[in-house]
Image (spheres, grey):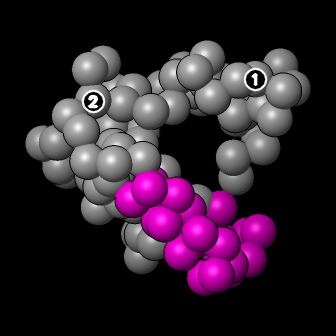
């Protein structure tokens, strides 16, 4: 679950900080390298315009329990919420991340 690794006092292995009060530009989210590429050669935490190249989105839709976010014990992900995230990623435009 995102909160467990990115909540108060925590940061993910990729160094992403998703606290609400952290400005987007300082969250290390857009174009940031991932710590585990999930078997893909081109993958970023969020790849602008490309949900299928974004680890954030892929972990939400993964059928693999060890990759899935949130963890199975927290229940099924909200499909409408996943689509909102996919649309947000698409809205960022299609550019090659600089990180």
Left or right of 42, for residue 90? right
Quadrant hosting residue 10: top right
Closer to the camera, 14 or 51?
51
Q: Quadrant of the C terminus?
A: top left
Vertical side of 71 occupied by 23: above or below: above
Magenta segment range? 70-91
Whole-number angstrom distance, CA of label 1 to CA of label 2: 20 Å
85 in magenta: yes
Identified at 42% across, 47% down, the residue is: 92
Label 2: how many Cα within 10 Å (few below 14, some 14–19, many 20+): some
Task: Name the residue: 54% across, 75% down.
Answer: 83
Residue shown at 59%/69% (left/top)?
84
**Mark 1, residue position:** 22
Dot 2 corresponds to which residue?
97
Q: Nearer the viewer, residue 10 or 32?
A: 32
Q: Position of residue 57 (x, y in %)?
A: 45, 59
Q: Is residue 40 left or right of residue 80?
A: left
Dot 1: what SS? Answer: loop
Q: Is residue 16 above or below residue 70?
A: above
């Amino acid at each position: 679950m995102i909160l467990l690794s990115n909540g108060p006092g925590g940061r993910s292995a990729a160094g992403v900080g998703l606290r609400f009060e952290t400005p987007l530009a300082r969250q290390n989210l857009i174009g940031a390298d991932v710590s585990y590429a999930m078997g893909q050669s081109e993958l970023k935490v969020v790849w602008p315009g490309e949900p299928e190249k974004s680890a954030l989105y892929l972990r939400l839709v993964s059928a693999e329990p060890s990759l899935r976010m949130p963890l199975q014990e927290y229940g099924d992900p909200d499909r409408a919420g996943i689509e909102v995230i996919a649309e947000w990623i698409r809205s960022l435009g299609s550019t090659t991340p600089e990180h």
